[in-house]
Amino acid sequence: MQVKNPMGDDVRSEVWVSGVEESELSGSKGTANFVMKWDKQSKHQAYAVVEQVKGLTRPIGAEDNNTWVPVVAFECRGLDMERHHPRDGWVVVSTSGKSFTDVDLSDDWCEVDEDTGDCISIMNLQSKFELKR
């Protein structure tokens, strides 16, 4: 991801946000999936929590070709999400149920489902962030 300080011009590129990794928030009993400070002397942490929102976020399916699909939501405090830089770690599940793990989506991806003989591909992946309040 690329994140920006909403109170200034500071930007951090290529940060890793994972829904399975959690860090404790200082001075709180809470946790977040991504925690940082814009300034090393700052007392305030900026953080993001990965969320799945019922009725909004969902996996992308074969019927979603050329359609925007909200796949993840973030609760962010002290930072704005600006860009998504897809890399490895993705899981792709074919219509037959075959899973392909640790898929790298930094470029077009294609594989053959050996159970059905079908070619499965993810091409021209694009992403965007929309602010919802």
Image (tube, rainbow, N blue to C red):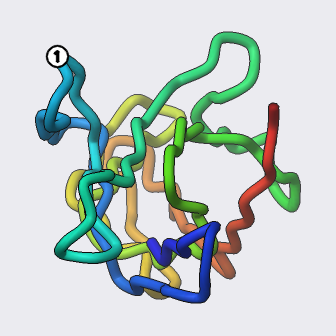
Taking the spot 52% from the left edge, 83% from the top edge, the residue there is 108
Above or below: residue 52 compared with residue 50: above
Q: Give the amino acid type for the residue marked by disc 1 in the picture.
A: Lys
Give the residue at the far right of this rendering: 67
Q: Could you say where residue 67 lies in the image, as x and y percent from the top left?
A: 87, 53
Task: Name the one closer to the observer, 105 or 24.
Answer: 24
- Around disc 1, counting alpha carbons within 10 Å, would you say few (fewer than 14), some (14 to 19), or many (20 or more)? few
Q: Is residue 43 left or right of residue 82?
A: left
Give the residue furthest to the top: 54
Say which residue appears at 47% left-offset and 87% top-offset: 107
- The quadrant in which the N terminus is found is bottom left
Residue 106 position by quadrant = bottom left
Answer with left or right where residue 74 lies relative to residue 116.
right
**Residue at 59%, 37% in the rendered image:** 73
Q: Nearer the viewer, residue 28 or 3?
A: 28
Disc count in the image?
1
**What percent of the width, then of the height, locates residue 95?**
53, 35
Q: Is residue 87 above or below residue 53?
A: below
At which x and y percent is residue 63? Answer: 80, 40
Q: Which residue is mark 1?
A: 29
Identify the secondary structure beneath mark 1.
loop
